[in-house]
Image (spheres, rainbow, N blue to C red):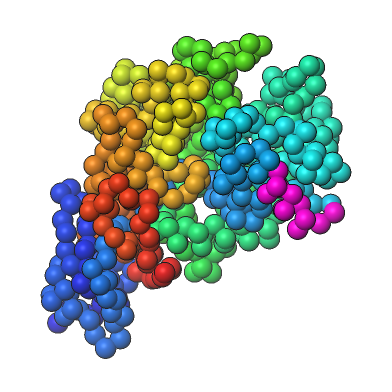
Amino acid sequence: MSASADRVFLDGEVHTLADPDETHEAVAVRDGAVVRVGDSYDVRFLAGAETDVVDLDGRVLLPGFVDAHTHLTTVGRYLVHADLSGADSPSDAVDLLAERAADCGPDEWVLGYGYDESTWEEERYLTRADLDAVDDERPVVAFREDMHVASANSVVLDRFADEVPADCLPTENGEPTGVLLEEGIDPVYEAVEPGPAETRDIVEAALADCAAKGITGFHDMVRNSHAPRVYRELDAADALTARVRINYWTDHLDALAETGLTTNAGSAFVQVGAVKSYTDGSFGGRTAKLSEPYEDAPPDAADATGQWVVDPEELAEHVAAATAEGFQFTAHAIGDVAIDAVLDAYETAAEPPVADPGEARHRVEHVELASDEAIERLAATGAVASVQPNFLKWADAGGLYESRIGDRTAETNRYRDLLDAGVHLAFGSDGMPMDPLLGVHWAVNAPAAAQRLSVTEALRAYTSGAAYAGFDEHRLGTVEPGKRADFAVLEESPWENPEGIREIDVTMTVVDGEVVYER
């Protein structure tokens, strides 16, 4: 007679999301793994005296969501500092910062995260004048949601006057506006980076938020942070409620190699991922690198086609070095010129004796404006397109894309074309916001009808697709015997109401067979 299950889930709508997607009523879990899926009558026989029996009551059970691209400590800072994502005007953002300032100590920085001026009637970045109105004695900084633009008050500008490159500091009438771009933000990042104790608070707040959204794993883009230490401490204490894949930056490569760490090294819960680099910037900051000028480029713009954060020659050197050490590589690339530069570097790195990029599963992050040729090259190299469907909010009529690139909006975020070409598609959020069902909603209801995915395809990109991007498809991403028991339970079926997916509640999250969230 088979040993009893630790936990059984009965009377639900269990989607395996395998190929093909099979639907069952029940699933049984033992030692953190799925041991059976089937109808409730059969699975019930695995329930012993000490088995936890969960009545799904018709709810939908899916594989847990895996966010293939996020910045967890930034997500946590939204929860700890001023959350500006809901601000609907500059004055509203200033009010939220002022509320935060009232709670800060006299020597504490006043920080806000997540403003998006493209949704405001007064479509402009926050300025030094706005933030001086919050406080003109303490440092005040507001980060745009893409983290490629920040706004600072006069205290901050004066403090870092000699450290910000001129091309990252827009001016008006010869005076800094308070806006910081790209590497001009780096001194601020370094100044506000929390210590180990505060990082743990931020990580734990973000992990609780992940659990409430059905996220059972994520790939964190980490740089100069105590987060890796916190993840490992939580893992050692059996207190980590999601699986973490840490993508380090190119300036960590030597240290990774010296310590003997390689891609996929680690535990069942914390693993080393890829080595990461930027190429270009963002559409929000007009710094994504394009083949044609921005529609709304300022008359005095140094380069109306964007700018390199890491130029192609340097990028190619990073890719070759990381690939030679056996690391997966992943590169931020938004504009069409940047995407081509990444593919050039991957194809060059594939020359003998370096490993094939398809085997290494090199990734391109964002892929917002890819040409037909780039999509074909992505498929040919086997590289993963790690994309963020929540960015489609900018593709609506009158949205950010239309302002920045006009008619080229229709060429952005081509998920249907990528999938049909055979490209490996992985969904993530970039923390803007970290909400898989919102991303699935946008992928299914994309403004460009020709690029829409089916509900099943979109859910797979946030489960098995993201698992593949992390070499985890044999362990995660579907509900099948032998896979880890990582589940998200939804109140309603996304297949029955595809227009309302973002309104669906997560009612339970299970990681390694343990319930980490219950609504």
The number of discs equals 0
Tell me the quadrant of the picture where the N terminus can be found.
Answer: bottom left
Tell me the quadrant of the picture where the C terminus can be found.
Answer: bottom left
| In the image: residue 339, left or right of residue 4 | right
Residue 335 visible in rendering = no
Residue 71 visible in rendering = yes
Toward the viewer: 106 or 203? 106
* Span of residues in magenta: 94-106
227 in magenta: no
Q: Residue at x 49, y 69 (%)?
A: 238
Q: Residue at x 34, y 45 (%)?
A: 441
Residue 340: horizontal and vertical position, in percent? 42, 19
Residue 137: horizontal and vertical position, in percent? 86, 43
* Residue 56 lies in quadrant: bottom left
Toward the viewer: 15 or 249? 15
Toward the viewer: 29 or 133? 133
Q: Residue pushed farthest bottom?
A: 49
- Looking at the magenta stretch, what is its main secondary structure? helix
Q: Residue at x 47, y 19 (%)?
A: 405
Residue 419: horizontal and vertical position, in percent? 26, 33
